[in-house]
Image (cartoon, grey):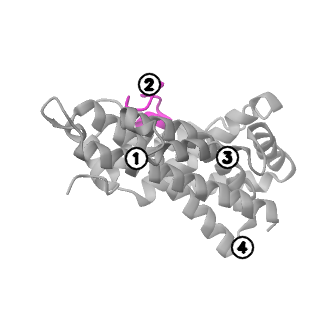
Amino acid sequence: MEMVHHTRLDCVIGSAALMRRAVVEAVHHARYRQAFGRALIRQPLMRNVLADLALESAAATMLGMRLARAFDEGDRGFARLAVTAGKFWVAKRTAPVVAEALECLGGNGFVEHSMMPRLYREAPLNSIWEGSGNVIALDVLRAIVKEPETLERVLAEIRMANDARVERFVANVRADLSESGARRTAERLALALEASLMIRFGPAPVADAFCASRLDGDWGHTFGSLPGGCDIDAVIASCGLETA
């Protein structure tokens, strides 16, 4: 596979690692910081924020590992489009994830004595490296138009979830393949891939929370706005972030 795709894979995996480190730092702080008579991690609103961040981190990690497997297997038909869409989405999501995780530490997250300012400075880099947002989104479009079999291969992978929520989400993916819709197409493909992987390889409560918020739209415009029906405790526990 072309060298640029190897580097884009690096961008996905590096971004997922940055997310994970930021979320771990936030959870560690929440375990020991007391407010209103109990640890922050026991406060319902903070738990919603941490669970939401954990979902984003887990999905990015799963997608990165699946893309790496495609390289190991020489599956160019899948990797050509999936790596490009994954690089667009995961790298874009890193900065807001790190920013929210930093805020979980309050003022401690802003000062240089903590790890968070370094992560915050690094967070945008992978979104710029090997093609910034518009370049990558247009490359997604280029792959679909010039190599339509790549879209079929990615859709086949997505549909392995055999899930109605995913089917609805990708039903109209071909509806707008214009240049102005390139970012929307890249985002939709990456989210559908993440959801498919979460459904197939993750615990059901985690997959359900991801689909409810990211696919079905029952989500606010900030982290910590997961819908009431989500099993917040199960999401935090399944990601290995719960208290001992």
Q: Is residue 138 visible?
A: yes
| Residue 167 drawn in magenta | no
Q: Which residue is mark 3?
A: 125
Vertical placement of residue 48 versus 90, above or below: above
Alpha carbon separation for disc pair 4 and 3:
27 Å
Q: Which residue is mark 4?
A: 74
Whichever of callouts 3 and 1 sits on the residue coming sooner in the sequence is 1
Q: Is residue 41 left or right of residue 221?
A: left
Q: Nearer the viewer, mark 4 or mark 3?
A: 3
- Residues under numbered marks 3 and 1 in contact, where contact means CB atoms less than 8 Å apart: no
Whichever of callouts 4 and 3 sits on the residue coming sooner in the sequence is 4
**226 or 4, which lies in front?**
4
- Residues under numbered marks 3 and 2 in contact, where contact means CB atoms less than 8 Å apart: no
Residue for point 50% across, 48% down: 195
**55 or 29, which lies in front?**
29
Vertical placement of residue 181 versus 5, above or below: above
Q: Which residue is mark 2?
A: 220
